[in-house]
Every structure is written in C-alpha cells, then in structure tokens.
Amino acid sequence: MPWFQTFQDGPEYEIRKRRRTFSPPNLSIKRLHNAVPHRLFERSTIRSLGYIFRHLAITFLFYYLATFIDVFTSTRTPHCSSFEWILHCLTRPVLWLLYWGWQGITFAGLWCLGHEAGHNALSPYTLVNDAIGLIVHTFVLTPYYSWRVTHSTHHKSTNNMDRDVTYIPSTRTDFKLPDRQIAKRMNYTEVLEETPAFTLFKLFVRQFFGFQLYLLHNRKGNPRYPTGTSHYIASSMLFQPKHRMSIFVSNATIIVFLALLLSCGYQAGWSHLTVHYLLPWLFAHNWIVLFTYLQHSDPTIPYYRKEQWTFARGALATVDRPLFGWVGRFFLHNISSDHVAHHFFPSVPFYNLPEVTEAIKPVLGEYYNYDSTPALYALWRSFTQCRFVEAEGDILFFKNQHGEAMLEPTV
C-alpha cells in the first residue's frame, strides 16, 4: 500500500457513504443459520489449547528477548564516532518501544482468548472455558466474570441506545445544543470545536486508560446506570443477584494477581516490572480500545431505539476490519476481521469464523459491513466525526462537529 493511502477512506466505506440514505434490514436468522455448515459450530478443547499454548510461548519469547535489550545497548566501543554513538543511544528506546508495542499486542491477544472463553467458544465444557478465561483475563487485569456478564448484555442489545452497555453516544441534549431545526453552524462550532492538541490528548487518555475507567466507574457506559456503577461492585445495577458470587471470585483473583505483581516488583525491581509488564499492559489497552471502539462506532453505522431495534439489526451494526492484516488474525484471533459473524454466532470458535463470514456474506448482501480503511486513520475519523446523535428518533447516525450525518434513515 502506498504511504498516502494510509490516510484515505477504504473503497467500501466510500460506497456506504455515497448511499446517503439507509433502510433498516429485515433479515431471516433461520436463513442465515442454514447458510453455515454445522461443523463450524463444533468446539475443540485440544485445538483451542494448542492456540493458547502457542500464544503463551510467543509472549514468553518476547519477554525473554527483551531481557537482552539493556545488555545489547549498554556498551560503547572506545573508537566509535559521534554519529555511531547517536545511533547507539537511539537503539535502546527504539527496541523498548518495539517490545512494548508487540508485547502489548500479545497481551491484547490474551484478552481476546478470555473473550472467547466468556462466550464458551473454546471448549464444549463450561468449566474449561471459565478456567481459561479467569486466568488470561486476570493476567491483563480484567475481572473475568463481571466483564462476561456485561459483554453478554452488549451482545443481546448491540447498538441499542437504551440497553447497550458501552460506547453509548452522547446526544444533542447532552451537549446542550439548540434544536436541529434552528441550530446554525456556529452553534456546533462553539460547543464541539477543539484544537488538534486537545483532541489528541483526549484520544490518548481514552486509548490507554479508557477501558480500565469503564470497568472502574462506567466511563462511556450507558448513562441509565447511576453514579458509582462499577464492574468491581457486585451490587451494581449491571448485575443480578445470581452473579454476585462470581463477581467476588473475579475481584479476589485480581487482588491475588496484584499482590503477585507487587511481589515481583519488590524482588526483581520496580523498573523491571514497569518495562516488562506495566508498559506492555498499557499498550495492550490501546489495542483493545482500538478494535472494540471501531467495531461499532462509525459514521456509517446506525444506532437504534425502541421497536426499531432487533437482534439482527444490532448484530449488523458492526464492521469487519482487516486490523493490521495477518497480525490481527494471528495475534488477535480474528476478533476484528470477523466480528459480524461473531455477533450472529458468538459461540463459534475464532478459528472457524473466517469460514462463517464467507458463508453468510451472500445472505447479508449490501448489509455486510467491511472497511479496509487503515486502522489508525479509521480511529481518527471515528473519534473526530462521531460526536453525537439526536436525542429523539429510533434510527440514528452519528453527526459530526458541524451537525451533519453521513446517512439518513428512510423510515
């Protein structure tokens, strides 16, 4: 791909944008289900464990190689030139950044495996799924059981403004904007316009800390939940009484793992803990927020209210993206490239999802959403253009900083 195409919309996005109008789909779930070969629903514990052990081995390999970075960059030959010394000084930060980025991807991949376990998609045995999910999610400081409950709610109410639990858009009322019939361009500019530096700062905070803030106090979650809502509080309205014991288990495992991390920092040194775990963990959150945000937040993807929402319409309100090409498929286990199929068939194992996607594409037709826009440009596009939705109406599209929507519903 030429460098300049990194900052261009993908052709699939351009096609959706040119439609200007949107008619909600009326899809037969039975027809969609019949299009998928039954063998693709089968889950193999052995095969899933093979993928997990391969992923863990690569994670450990990255860690092992990183232990040589300081040794490799700590010596300077007595007769090297100034230019060579500058290159030598640059080598160390570059190698550490590469390690944090790549190890962050493996950590995000472990989170994806926990996500699969939460859907019982790794094994036909619930106990096996829960054991795997609890271990790998705890490793990246995600409370497995509480997150599984709210993620199940997300699947049952995807892009439903009233019932979905995450990435709920702000409304015109939230920004105290004038009614759209009388609002002028300057009204939007006064409220929504930001300097690029401030936008970048907000993006940085959201990418690296947003997921943990969502877990801690429902940041960007559904505003119908009261102040104090948290994935760590078993009495939160996010959960039912039957979930409380499992929430305590999630919290206990997080506490035990934090104690292990503190012990590691005390024994091996806090800098060792920081460079080998904390910074890769932060980079992992960047990747997790990247793909989860882009799965449903897009100027061409609708949100629904009331009777206009159906399970099929919610499942179709997502976008398949070839996130980082083979890297996304190999390390992130198809979580972005086959997300539409995953929403229709969440218990299908990730290694079968590419075949499921190909099987259902002819049935979905024009309602299958795919976007080859490079990920970082798509992130910037959604973050700057998906500003708010209307406070009324049952089929909604994001509006930009000028109060303009990319598509308008025909209903």
Image (cartoon, rainbow, N blue to C red):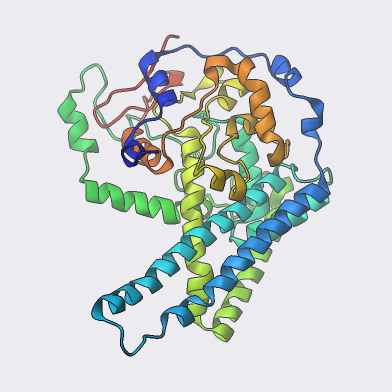
The image quarter containing residue 30 is top right
Q: Nearer the viewer, residue 241 or 293?
A: 293
Kindly identify the residue that appears in the image at 68 percent across and 55 percent down. 247
In front here: 208 or 41?
41
Residue at point 66% right, 53% down?
A: 144
- Rendered location of residue 126, percent (x, y): 81, 47
The answer to whether 48 is drawn above or below residue 2 in the figure is below
Assign the C terminus to one quadrant of the image. Answer: top left
Q: Quadrant of the N terminus?
A: top left
Q: How far from the left and from the top, in percent, is residue 297? A: 44, 34
Q: Among all residues in the image, which is located at the extreme top?
A: 410
Residue that lies at the very extreme toward the left in this rendered image: 186
Residue 300 shows in this picture: no
Q: Tell me what residue is drawn at x 64 percent, y 28 percent.
A: 357
Q: Residue furthest bottom?
A: 78
- State the image coordinates of residue 79 (x, y, percent, origin top left): 31, 88
Quick check: 137 above or below 88? above
Closer to the camera, 242 or 341?
Answer: 341
Horizontal and vertical percent position of residue 344: 66, 28
- The relative height of residue 216 versus residue 169 in the rendered view (above or below) is below
